[in-house]
Image (cartoon, rainbow, N blue to C red):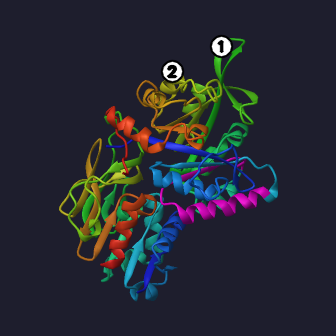
Amino acid sequence: MLTKRIIPCLDVKDGRTVKGVNFVNLRDAGDAVELGAMYAAQGADELVYLDITATVDGRSTFIDLVRRVAQTINIPFTVGGGISSIADVSALLHAGADKVSINSAAVRNPDLINELSLEFGSQCIVVAIDTRYVETENGFEHIVHTHGGRKATEIRSIPWAKEVEERGAGEILLTSMDTDGTKNGFALELTATISGNANIPVIASGGAGNMAHFYDVFTAGKADAGLAASIFHFREIDIPDLKEYLKNKDLPIRMTR
Amino acid sequence: MKTVIIKYNAGNVQSVMYALDRIGASYLYTDDEAEIRSADKVIFPGVGEASTTMSYLRNVGLDKVIPSLKQPVFGTCVGMQLMCRFSEENNTECMGIFDVDVKRFPAASGLKVPHMGWNNITGYQSPLTAGIPDNAYVYFVHSYAAPICDYTIASCDYALPFSAMLHKDNFYAAQFHCEISGNAGQQILENFLKL
């Protein structure tokens, strides 16, 4: 049976993991390759590496990191952050990334989704949607945000999710800026709406604080995968414990131990 | 031992190369017929669409070379589908090594297509799965699949049972991506190289 995926997300700056990480058994917790390998060994189903570097030098460092990750780990991984062209995607895929995630560039130029999926295949094109529930002239609506959730657009998130699928996205990474960082749980209703409408997998992100939140997002939220960062980095949840918990609640989970 | 990865217009095969690096296997990435024929093992990877990849293989003559190979050949993902008789993906006549037709997953099942993620395989019947635990999880990304048939050596279930692996004579194939399927995938690659 197709399993629900658990995905740790690593923010990378200048080739190193940011967000304080607290792993006593790692030689260098800032080493994004070593941290990723450890998550893979613990049973993570995929990894996401987000490049939060803004400089050109940082960019080439990131590509070098992608190459080292691909050489080291034997599970799929997605890379994102600042991707805006066919050339960017080509460089990352050739370095060994399995999928790329685009966000602001897709909002600026939706045709990019079509171009990338034709060039590289839908299966490796993830569209990240950062959404926030805000008051508009029509009352409260889910609105797409860019620039790490700081900048509002005019685009409504629910139809946008359908549009990116029609344009050729292979997967949606849905982050609720309302729940992100709260540890109060994922945005279940919105995730269920978008995943229920979609014929492509939806990765839910934002708000995971405990193991029950993952159960909720896979059941009520209808998500195909759940992504989190700090709760894994700070070892508030260990991936083997989380997977055992979900398995015991009869969800399809890939067990590795 | 000489291992060749067949070069054609398939998508990125970098992860296949890294997977071979991890198990310490050297390889040549080439479309040269003489090099392919002289290899001990041939890997035919694939990410892409059936009709474009098949017409490329026809143009360069690899559609005749591959079925005539005598050494162990291992096709993965689209590589496996191209080794079948026919694919519903843009109604493509394929190489016909495995006499079976590749079909699209039924839309009516309520399941998402592509079938993307980790799913378990069962019913092992070949040395390729030696040492792999029952119901091992491997990573799939595909919208088309070969049904269960005489050549099935491992099966999987998504909407309906389908062939996760095929075998006939010196030809082996896997629908999933061994190169990113954790330890199980790595073991299958190692088993192939040991054939």
The amino acid pointed to by label 2 is Glu
The span picked out in magenta is A58-84
List x then y, in percent, for residue B138.
37, 55
In this rendering, the answer to whether A86 lies above or below A222 is below
Image quarter in which the N terminus of chain A is found: top left
* In the foreground, A189 or A124: A189
Mark 1 closeness class: few <14, some 14–19, many ≥20 residues within 10 Å: few
Mark 2 closeness class: few <14, some 14–19, many ≥20 residues within 10 Å: few
Is residue A166 something that shows in the picture? no
Task: Give the left or right position of residue B28, taking residue B193 as reference.
Answer: right
Q: Secondary structure at mark 1?
A: strand
Image-quadrant location for residue B183: bottom left
Q: Earlier in the sequence, mark 1 or mark 2?
A: 1
Mark number, residue A114: none
In this rendering, the answer to whether A33 lies above or below B71 is above
Q: Secondary structure at mark 2?
A: helix
* In the foreground, B89 or A105: A105
The amino acid pointed to by label 1 is Phe
Task: Give the left or right position of residue B97, taking residue A179 as reference.
Answer: left
Residue indicated by mark 2 = A189
Is residue A228 something that shows in the picture? yes
* In the foreground, A243 or B138: A243
* In the foreground, A16 or A162: A16
Task: Give the left or right position of residue B115, taking residue B10 as reference.
Answer: left
